[in-house]
Image: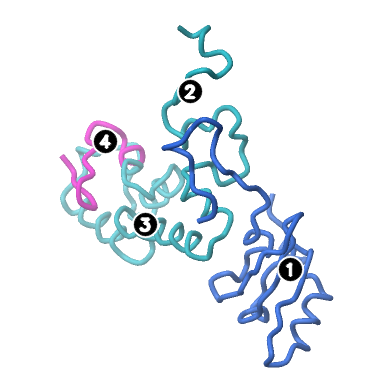
Amino acid sequence: MSRSLKKGPHVDLRLLAKVEKQGPNKEPIKTWSRDCTIVPEFIGATFLVHNGKTFHRVYCTEDMVGHKLGEFSPTRTFKGHSGGKAKAAPPGK
Amino acid sequence: MPRIQGVDIPPDKPTHISLRYIRGLGPSTALEVCAKLHIDPQRRAKELSDDEIGRIAALLGGDAYLVEGPLRRQEASNIARLKEIKAYRGERHRKNLPCRGQRTKTNARTRKGPRKTVAGKKGVKDLR
């Protein structure tokens, strides 16, 4: 079920504040709020989004508005099945 | 045989059913199209006059509906966008796996295609 429009998008307010007070230097912001929606204010900002283990660098572009930060920080690694040599999917993209 | 939006030719069914053979028209939009043009949805498609077919084609060709080619193009570009921004759903599309959180341990055959049996895996002997 999708989120009620009445509430508006879920945005981590502390994260939004950090983005807004950020000057032109644009340091990546470490964050754990994977559920935070990317709002237009985030365009051009860089985040380090936690995936449960490490931080994944996410640079926000216009296309990403409306998605959540967590969508860009994969939580699983699949390195192929055992024994499969030719068909094993290469790690990463 | 009526021909609307390129290749679609469904003759012996009621008009509102026939229209559903056009990609982008489902049960409710098909009825909506009939109502808008004052065509009885229960009449057979082959009984439609050339004028009526022309009007349907004009309505579907306009901006009000997105059907066939343009619809397919939009679908493809939506997926391309997900892939480009490296979203999770884009990666799932790239790997031809379900994008909406379904299980893949079993099932998911629509996306994964026919089963690829792996030798030596548990249960394989029983199948032979």
Between the C-alphas of marks 4 and 2, the distance is: 51 Å
Q: Residue at x 26, y 35 (%)?
A: B44
The residue that label 1 is drawn on is: A8
- The tint chain A carries is blue
- Residue B47: image tag: none
Q: Amino acid at mark 1?
A: Gly
- Asked if badges 4 and 2 are on one and the same chain, I answer yes
Q: Is residue A37 above or below residue B60?
A: below
Q: Is residue B23 above or below residue A15?
A: above
Helix, strand or loop for disc 4: loop
The image shows residue A60 at horizontal and vertical percentages of 61, 74
Q: Amino acid at mark 4?
A: Arg
The residue that label 4 is drawn on is: B44
Q: Is residue A15 magenta?
A: no
Magenta extent: B1-18
- Residue B118: image tag: 2
- B121 lies left or right of A50: left
First-in-chain label (4 vs 2): 4
Q: Amino acid at mark 3?
A: Leu
The image shows residue A2 at horizontal and vertical percentages of 68, 54
The residue that label 3 is drawn on is: B71
Q: Residues within 10 Å of mark 3 (few under 14, many from 20)?
A: some
First-in-chain label (3 vs 4): 4
First-in-chain label (3 vs 2): 3
